[in-house]
Amino acid sequence: MGRFSSIAKSVKATNSFKRSSKADSAASSAADVESNRLEETVVEPAHPAPRLGADEEAKRLSSENAQLAGENTALRSEVNLLKLKVELLVDMVTLANLDCDKLSEELEQKELELEQRDPQQLVGKG
């Protein structure tokens, strides 16, 4: 059971991380909406800004790639944790099924013992 408790602790930690990530994401989305509102109200200049040079474009793309790589890593970690959660749940269901089988066998054994002691008592119940 030590394995299960450590996985359960990991699950709890991930759930709290997800909640804080969702809050951060919501705050970021709200900031983006506000930013878009400000952009909509800004008057365009008479002369458009010059296009980014090749160096600036490369830096922007490199930064974007790094950000996407970080997000990809985070998603892979979350997928791995979800796989562990599923494995834990499957193990828990397996243990519950084994317990049910054991209890069912014990019940059948008790019924056989009762039937051997007093067969008339069980006939009246059935």
Image: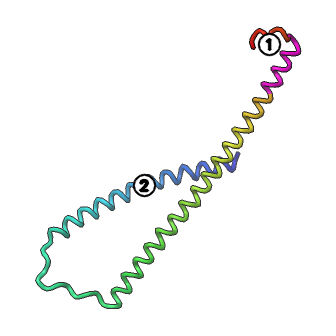
Q: Is residue 4 magenta?
A: no
The quarter of the picture where residue 118 lies is: top right
| Residue at 55% in and 63% down | 77
Q: Is residue 108 magenta?
A: yes
Secondary structure beneath disc 2? Answer: helix
Question: Residue 38 got which mark?
Answer: none
How crowded pointer 1 is (Cα within 10 Å; few <14, some 14-19, many 20+) is rated as: some
Span highlighted in magenta in the image: 106-118
Q: Amino acid at mark 2?
A: Ser
Q: Nearer the viewer, mark 1 or mark 2?
A: 1
x and y, in percent, of residue 13 in the image: 53, 52
x and y, in percent, of residue 12 in the image: 54, 49
Q: Amino acid at mark 1?
A: Leu
**Residue at image mark 2:** 20
What is the residue that sits farthest to the right in this orientation?
116
Q: Earlier in the sequence, mark 1 or mark 2?
A: 2
| Residue at 76% in and 34% down | 101
Q: Is residue 69 above or below residue 14?
A: below
The quarter of the picture where residue 119 lies is: top right
Instruction: Give the CA separation, mark 1 to mark 2.
Output: 59 Å
21 horizontally vs 83: left or right = left
Secondary structure beneath disc 1? Answer: helix
Question: Residue 122 got which mark?
Answer: 1
Q: Quadrant of the N terminus?
A: top right
28 horizontally vs 45: left or right = right
109 horizontally vs 85: left or right = right
x and y, in percent, of residue 90 in the image: 66, 47
